[in-house]
């Protein structure tokens, strides 16, 4: 057993596992992966554990950390095991926003030509609900107008996101600049008419687990997991991640972390320039 942190909403266990035992569900962003790999090499430690479902070892948060460790040929990975079925762990989508003011007509024409989607106009106020209920596959919205995207083909959620990735590529081809945003930010952009927003469906937890276990990798930025508590700055030396004996490596990790002080930070705390919406549990050297 690793180091246990019990919080009001979540039970967490920090431990080491074989990196080959982990299942990822989402592609990485090449530039972000390169930057993280270079940071790991320079610092020679992994600051934050990878958030993983305790039952299946599906990675919920930390896809780039897994990929970077694999690329650097490490055998072990520090993980924070959680119960994914805990309702306190929430699953949302990342919405796509496009700026630069290019004509949406040009964009929708490209979509209908190069994807299986057909498009029909609709008031933007109904677009979110239609996509959430999967009555349409996706929607483009700006101001009071939206374009609903549907296909005569039966598309799985994986295939829908493959087409969403294609739409991102088409947008960049014609000069749109792509941003990823939360639902509240996307709603504000639509209301203000400041950006064209691609409304995408949220996956279910079952779809995440089933896809990962089948090794079906979704497009980047498919899921946005909100975990109510997060351990930070465990600062595991990378040299420990090449040990052959997992049991001994975990005993070493446990002794190392138990010497540290754990400080809880409330949701909304800014740590190293990032605002954490969840409770943060910082491992501090005594």
Image: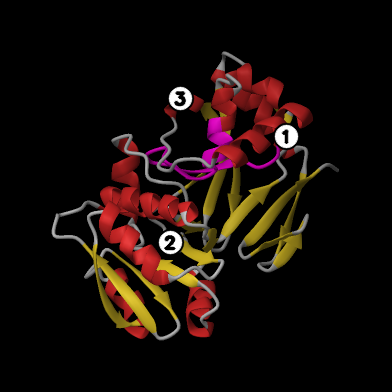
Q: Nearer the viewer, residue 200 or 114?
A: 114
Q: Residue furthest top?
A: 244
- The figure's colour scheme reads secondary structure
Task: Provide the residue span drawn in magenta.
Answer: 46-67
Q: Evaluate if marks 2 and 1 touch, with contact meaning CB atoms under 8 Å apart.
A: no
Q: Quadrant of the N terminus?
A: top right
Measure the alpha-carbon separation of dots 1 and 3: 22 Å
- Name the element at disc 2: loop
Residue at figure coordinates x 63%, y 25% from the top left:
251
Q: Quadrant of the C terminus?
A: top right
Residue at figure coordinates x 45%, y 24% from the top left:
20
Q: Which residue carries the number 1 mark?
A: 39
Q: Which residue carries the number 3 mark?
A: 20
Dot placed on the residue nearer the N-terminal end, 2 or 1: 1
Horizontal placement of 136 versus 187: left or right?
A: left
Q: Nearer the viewer, residue 110 or 192?
A: 110
- Name the element at disc 1: helix
Q: Which residue carries the number 2 mark?
A: 93
How many numbered discs, if any? 3
Q: Evaluate if marks 3 and 2 touch, with contact meaning CB atoms under 8 Å apart.
A: no
- Residue 284, percent from left and from top: 80, 46
Measure the alpha-carbon separation of dots 2 and 1: 28 Å
Badge 3: residue crowd in 10 Å (few <14, some 14–19, many ≥20) = few
Badge 2: residue crowd in 10 Å (few <14, some 14–19, many ≥20) = some
């Amino acid at each position: 057993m690793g180091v246990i942190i019990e919080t009001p909403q979540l039970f967490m266990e920090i431990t080491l596992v074989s990196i080959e035992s982990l299942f990822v569900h989402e592609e990485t962003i090449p530039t972000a992966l390169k930057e993280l790999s270079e940071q790991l090499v320079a610092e020679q430690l992994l600051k934050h554990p990878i958030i993983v479902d305790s039952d299946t070892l599906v990675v919920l948060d930390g896809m780039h950390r897994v990929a970077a460790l694999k690329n650097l040929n490490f055998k072990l990975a520090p993980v924070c095991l959680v119960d994914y079925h805990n309702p306190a762990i929430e699953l949302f989508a990342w919405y796509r926003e496009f700026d630069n003011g290019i004509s949406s007509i040009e964009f929708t024409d490209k979509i209908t030509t190069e994807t299986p989607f057909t498009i029909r106009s609709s008031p933007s106020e109904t677009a979110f609900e239609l996509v959430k209920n999967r009555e349409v596959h996706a929607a483009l919205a700006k101001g009071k107008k939206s374009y609903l995207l549907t296909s005569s083909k039966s598309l799985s959620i994986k295939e829908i996101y493959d087409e969403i990735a294609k739409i991102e590529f088409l947008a960049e081809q014609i000069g749109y600049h792509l941003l990823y945003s939360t639902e509240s930010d996307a709603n504000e952009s639509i209301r203000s008419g400041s950006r064209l927003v691609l409304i995408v469906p949220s996956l279910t937890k079952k779809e995440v687990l089933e896809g990962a276990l089948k090794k079906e990798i979704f497009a980047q930025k498919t899921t946005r997991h909100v975990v109510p508590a997060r351990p930070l700055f465990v600062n595991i030396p990378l040299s420990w991640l090449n040990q052959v004996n997992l049991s001994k490596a975990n005993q070493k990790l446990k002794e190392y972390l138990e010497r540290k002080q754990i400080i809880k930070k409330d949701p909304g705390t800014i740590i190293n320039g990032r605002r954490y919406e969840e409770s943060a549990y910082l491992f501090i050297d005594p």
